[in-house]
Amino acid sequence: MSHSESSPSASVAAPSLSEGQAAMARKITNPMLFRGWMLAKLPAALFAGVGLREISADRCATTVPYGWRSQNPFKSTYFAALAMAAELSTGALVLLATNDAPFSTLIVNMSATFGKKATGTTTFVCTGGPAVFAAVREAAATGEARAFTLETVGALADGTEVSRFTFTWSVKPRSKKA
């Protein structure tokens, strides 16, 4: 299995969404449908209050509140709650890009840095959509796995950066069964 790695900073044009992808984006930005999906797929993130604020072919923004469901004993948002929101900001882009065909997806690496205490709602923004769509197109064309790295930055409402997460994803088309 061959892996190639790309960076989201590569100069890639924003893709347009297919009808299926646009329908998925509408569904997951509907608060009621999103809560139902979270209950079925990510109940811990639902409990922590993780939310999806926006998604497009370019970017995804997610939030996690500071409160009793997500705080640690040090009076800030627990790093695991931050990680759930960070991962969703990249993973939702992967789900969107792979919506039209069956793909295997996997996080193969993750790193994080924490600069300030998260003492309010933290918003994570990932702007790597074009790189995700490019890697998915390449994997679909070759039938081989493609790895790519996405960065997401978490900030408080006043713009204070609290953390930065980097996720390396691998996508591979699922083989069709005869």
Image (spheres, rainbow, N blue to C red):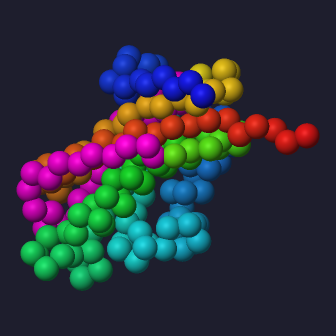
In the rendered image of this protein, does residue 161 appear above or below residue 80?
A: above
Quadrant for residue 144, please give it: top right
Residue 121 lies in the magenta stretch: yes
Q: Position of residue 42 (x, y in %)?
A: 50, 67
Which residue appears at 20% of the width and 69% of the height? 77
Span highlighted in magenta in the image: 107-134
Q: Quadrant of the N terminus?
A: top right
Q: Would residue 34 appear left or right of 175 to someone viewing this image?
A: left
Question: Given the current orientation, which residue lies at the most extreme top position?
Answer: 11
Residue 133 lies in the magenta stretch: yes
Which residue appears at 62% of the width and 35% of the height? 172
Q: Position of residue 118 (x, y in %)?
A: 15, 63
Question: Given the current orientation, which residue lies at the most extreme bottom position?
Answer: 68
In the rendered image of this protein, does residue 113 appear above or below residue 132?
A: below
Q: Quadrant of the C terminus?
A: top right
Residue 168 can be seen, yes or no = yes
Q: Nearer the viewer, residue 89 or 157?
A: 89
Which residue appears at 59% of the width and 71% of the height? 40
Q: Position of residue 88 (x, y in %)?
A: 42, 54
Q: Would residue 22 appear left or right of 31 to someone viewing this image?
A: right
Residue 60 can be seen, yes or no = no
Which residue appears at 66% of the width and 21% of the height? 142
Question: Given the current orientation, which residue lies at the most extreme front position?
Answer: 1
